[in-house]
Amino acid sequence: MDLAASTVALALAAVTLSTFIQFATGSGFGILGGPLLLMIDPGLVPGPLLLLTVVVMLAVVWTERRGLRHVDLGWAALGAVPAGIGALWLVRLMDERVTEIVVGVAIAVGVIAGLAGWKVRQTRPALVVAGVLGGALSTIAATPGPPVVVVYRTADVSRYRANLSLFFVATSVVSLSTLIVSGELDSTDVTAAAWLLPAVVLGALVAHFLVRLIPPRSIRPAALAMCLISAVSLIVSALAG
């Protein structure tokens, strides 16, 4: 993948912002990073973004490890694994514009639901369905977050961040494995991800110093608002293309 300097600069900025949002809220790396990178260069999704997602999520899980509860999203992971594998045929069938529209709409629906305060009852069936949708979105565009974010709730901020990030590790590994076996992931994807790794480090450092200064209640609404803007921009870009 031959990336122009301007493309690399924009991608670095997008990954830095997305990493910060993930560390601050426990979600948002794929939700924000997916649409932004798709607009910057479609070749950065899903392969390079999935590789970066694993790195970012493992870092958040380690940072928030005291909040880990393996049972929280076990049912969601159970639905995500087969869905992530099965969604591979969609990647082959759908062109870039359709992928952008599907991802944009999925993100917009999830974000609007969150901003409106809509809460899905956190039952096992609801978690499985959220996992299925998240797993499919992970393979299609490295964006497993919206369905699970809408369903999963806990008052413990550390627990929320840790367990969402652990779920994203699982979905990303499944999707990456699927892409590798199918030959959809190659050395150019790894190279592109390597170029963007410094942005992950920068985003994590910024989060380390700034997250504690931000009122907790304002973080999630702000992140959701940015994600909504990103999703709408992605849909408009796809329709105009």
Image: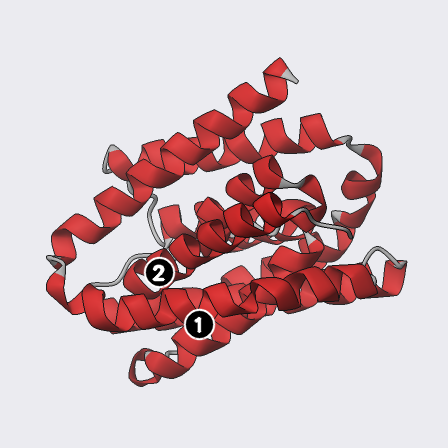
Q: In this view, does 218 lie above or below 158?
A: above
* Residue 195 visible to the viewer: yes
- The C terminus lies in which quarter of the figure? top right
How packed is label 2: few (under 14 Cα within 10 Å), some, or many (20 or more)?
many
Q: Which of 197 and 215 is in front in this view?
A: 197
Left or right of 9? Residue 80 is right
| Residue pictured at 62% horizontal, 64% vertical | 195
- Could you tell me residue 63's position as x and y percent? 34, 80
Q: Is residue 96 above or below residue 164?
A: above
Residue tagged 1: 201
Mark on residue 20?
A: 2
- Could you tell me residue 112's position as x and y percent? 34, 32
Q: Which of 91 and 135 is in front in this view?
A: 91
Q: Is residue 235 above or below residue 26?
A: above
| Residue pictured at 51% horizontal, 34% vertical | 106
Q: What residue type is labelled 2?
A: Phe
* Residue 81 visible to the viewer: no
